[in-house]
Amino acid sequence: MIGQVDILIFLITIIATAIFTSVVRRELLVADIRDNPIISEHRQKSGTPTMGGFGIILGVLLMALFLFDWHSSSYLLITVFMIVVAGLFGMFDDLLGFKVKEYQKVVRNDGTEPVHIGLLTLEPGEEARIASPKAKKDYNKIVEQEHKLTVIDEIPIKSETTEKEKILTQFVVACFIILPGVLPTNISGFEIGYLMIPLAICAIIGSINSINLIDGMDGLAAGIIAIASVASALYANISTGSVASLPFIVIAGASVGFLVLNHYPAKIFMGDTGSYALGTGYMVAALLGNSLIFSIIALAVPIVSVIISLLHRAHVITLPVEPLHHTLNYHGMSEQKIVLLYWGLTVVASIVALFIFGII
């Protein structure tokens, strides 16, 4: 089981990451590196420093140096190496986001009848962002027909890499796990040989996308990773040993440390720098520690969120706002309640995984 030394490492990581995040926040403010949310309900967060994932990266780097011993911390060193690589790739996505691609209109229905625009039906007094090509086309028709849609804001939309470019970038990140030659060749006792390489790459890509997509509300992604990592550390410690649980303990500590400034109302956002780093680090720790299946179950909430978004994009289901947590917010659930709900569901998923694998 997790011992006193592990708890001490966890606490030191929290303190170190919180300090680093505070320093990073100060430097980001000086450099005027700030977020500009496109979700109408989150416009009040405009100006919050982003790319705060550097605080997480510095926190885990310090712990890797502090605990440096190849025999007892090899999994941690490899995991931290992958976190740094992923964070750097995520940083380029963040930097690209400071270039404005277009300005999207936010409109309000000032008429007395509902107005259909895009996938939404705006009741009198309701607001919406004109984002999709269909919504833009509908808006032009509505204006020509003299419906009372009033433009109340214009939101700058950042430049982003395409979905194919993102996947290619994430593929390159995932391929770095092959270099050390440390991937196991079995999953829960089943020997799969070289098939582990494509499986590992797909798992890392999936984890990056899951954390990147769920990172849309204050403390949401960091809290989920912290909970799932604590559960994975418990499992890995019993099934494989302390060398396998150590990366999860450090990731959990870094996530909690980041939450010190990232909880609602957030004073800093992790950006793609942080979501790429955490998504990669979590899954690399799972692969090295032979806890892949367990860790996937513990990460069920963001994984399900990705699946729902994919169904929306494939037009199997329709969401007024993507991803699902923004839909819940759109329908009136407060951000704090959504975050607590998702954290609670992650606790449930982790307990279920611990029960399935006979840990409790």
Image (cartoon, rainbow, N blue to C red):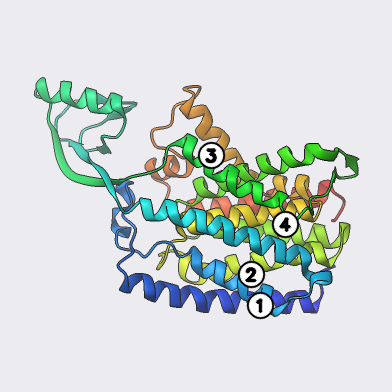
Neighbours of disc 4 within 10 Å: few (<14), some (14-19), many (20+): many
Q: Position of residue 63 (x, y in %)?
A: 66, 75
Instruction: Report whether residue 220 is seen.
Output: no
Q: Nearer the viewer, residue 56 or 175?
A: 175
Q: Earlier in the sequence, mark 4 or mark 3?
A: 3
> Could you tell me which quadrant the N terminus lies in?
bottom right
215 vs 205, left or right, is: left
Q: Earlier in the sequence, mark 2 or mark 1?
A: 1
Q: Residue at x 50, y 60 (%)?
A: 219
Q: CA distance from mark 3 to mark 1?
A: 35 Å
- Residue type at the position of mark 1: Leu
Q: Is residue 317 above or below residue 271?
A: above
Q: Is residue 1 above or below residue 188?
A: below
Contact, CB < 8 Å: mark 2 with mark 1?
yes
Q: Position of residue 339 (x, y in %)?
A: 51, 54
Q: Position of residue 93 (x, y in %)?
A: 43, 51
* Residue to which mark 1 is pinned: 11
Nearest-to-viewer mark from 1 and 4: 4
Neighbours of disc 2 within 10 Å: few (<14), some (14-19), many (20+): many
- Residue type at the position of mark 2: Gly
* Residue to which mark 3 is pinned: 167
The total number of labels drawn is 4
Q: Residue at x 85, y 39 (%)?
A: 193
